[in-house]
Image (cartoon, rainbow, N blue to C red):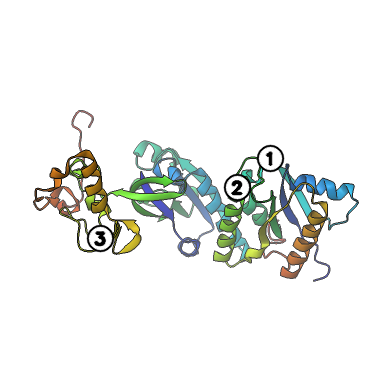
């Protein structure tokens, strides 16, 4: 999933300081699962913003809507009848949400309520970790199921570096050295030979280096 | 500030503090009527929104009275409640409100005296803080 985190309240309050009628738009996709922008988080932010405004002796009208997804036009369409009633919209989706809302409703003032962090998964309830950088050419099978691009601080394909110490990364002792994990796993599987050959430089044109990306499935498009 | 009559919401777990309030009543213990008790099946049910909404509506304080550590009927409800209270405290701090307006206490069903004591403590604390800045502005 895409993992996101709510922006600090002070930043959101500053974004909407000139407005009195706003709409919070949540998303039932990834950001609901990572507890950043689902129906409940929309309610919490709405209550917090209203408290902050009331404290200043001012009123704030906040409408709450949570869409199935904000990355599909048909769901964005569901607020078309009310979008003009508000001075500002705060999207509680990953950064795709505010962009899709802005594209569909060019006259609306759309603000991002979340900071999009990474693609990852839950390690435990309330703890998420990065697992993918979207390089466009997955090679995790060569490294015992670990992605060295994401999980090695230097994205080394021929590791480990000299900073690996007791299985930990030199940049932070709380971060596993993924190359330590790779070697352990491949040794256990008897496939250490996988990493004996030197990996050639990676072709990054499938990643961001090739510019903004698009996927087209001819049979669906 | 002596005429300030605070409105305080207290979420009480039915297995501990709600029964402690009953015990206080049976013992004819007096405590301030500012405490508005809401019974919950477990304080693990008390969501962040349950704490924020009364504040938004002008409550001067919102507290949670949970089971003693390790005594939760549902194992970790009181631990979850504490984390949520801490979250709301941080939120209030962020928007410039006193985090002391919310809090959590641990109490067992037999502690009627302690319940009355906590009710006094909460009321005194909120009286010292004064009315919520939202007080009277909600209507």
Pick whichever of labels 2 and 1 is earlier in the sequence.
1
What residue is rendered at 35% in x and 39% in y?
A: A73
- In this view of the protein, which residue sits in the foreground, A116 or A129? A129
Q: CA distance from mark 3 to mark 1?
A: 50 Å
Label 1 resides on the chain identified as B
What residue is rendered at 22% in x and 32% in y?
A: A221
Q: Mark 2 packing: few (<14 Cα in 10 Å), some, or many (20+)?
A: some
Q: Mark 3 and mark 2, same subunit?
A: no
- In this view of the protein, which residue sits in the foreground, A14 or B20? B20
Determine whether the residue tagged by mark 3 lies in a helix, strand or loop.
Answer: loop
Q: Mark 3 and mark 1, same subunit?
A: no
Q: Which mark is residue B47?
A: 2
According to the image, label 1 marks what residue?
A: B41
Please say if A199 is above or below B41. Answer: below
What residue is rendered at 61% in x and 53% in y?
A: B82
Q: CA distance from mark 3 to mark 2?
A: 42 Å
- In this view of the protein, which residue sits in the foreground, B128 or A61? B128
Q: Mark 3 packing: few (<14 Cα in 10 Å), some, or many (20+)?
A: some
Label 3 resides on the chain identified as A
Label 2 resides on the chain identified as B
According to the image, label 3 marks what residue?
A: A164
- Relative image position of residue B87 (x, y in whole percent): 56, 57
């Amino acid at each position: 999933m895409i993992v996101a985190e709510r922006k600090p309240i002070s930043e959101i309050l500053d974004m909407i300081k000139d407005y009195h009628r706003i709409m919070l738009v949540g998303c039932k996709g990834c950001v609901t699962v990572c507890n950043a922008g689902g129906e409940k988080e929309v309610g919490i932010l709405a209550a917090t913003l209203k408290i902050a405004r009331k404290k200043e002796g001012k009123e704030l009208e906040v409408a709450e809507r949570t869409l199935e997804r904000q990355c599909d036009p048909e769901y964005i369409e569901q607020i078309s009848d009310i979008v003009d009633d508000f001075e500002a919209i705060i999207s509680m989706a990953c950064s795709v949400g505010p962009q899709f809302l802005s594209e569909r409703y060019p006259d609306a003032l759309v603000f991002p309520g979340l900071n999009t962090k990474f693609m990852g998964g839950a390690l435990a309830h309330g703890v998420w970790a990065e697992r993918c950088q979207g390089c466009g050419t997955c090679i995790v099978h060569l490294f015992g199921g670990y992605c060295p691009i994401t999980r090695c601080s230097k994205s080394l394909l021929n590791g480990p570096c000299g900073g690996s110490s007791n299985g930990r990364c030199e940049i932070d002792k709380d971060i596993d050295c993924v190359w330590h994990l790779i070697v352990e796993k491949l040794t256990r599987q008897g496939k250490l030979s996988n990493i004996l050959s030197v990996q050639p430089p990676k072709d990054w044109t499938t990643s961001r280096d090739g510019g903004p990306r698009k996927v087209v499935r001819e049979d669906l498009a | 500030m002596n005429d300030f009559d605070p409105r305080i919401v207290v979420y009480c777990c039915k297995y501990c503090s709600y029964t402690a309030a009953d015990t206080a009543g049976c013992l004819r213990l007096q405590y301030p009527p500012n405490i508005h008790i809401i019974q919950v099946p477990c304080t693990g049910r008390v969501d962040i929104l349950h704490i924020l909404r009364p504040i938004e509506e002008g409550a001067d304080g919102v507290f949670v009275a949970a089971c003693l550590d390790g005594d939760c009927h549902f194992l970790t409800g009181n631990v979850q409640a504490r984390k949520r209270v801490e979250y709301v405290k941080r939120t209030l701090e962020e928007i410039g409100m006193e985090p002391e307006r919310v809090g959590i206490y641990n109490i067992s069903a037999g502690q009627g005296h302690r319940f009355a004591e906590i009710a006094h403590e909460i009321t005194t604390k909120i009286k010292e803080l004064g009315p919520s800045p939202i007080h009277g502005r909600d209507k």
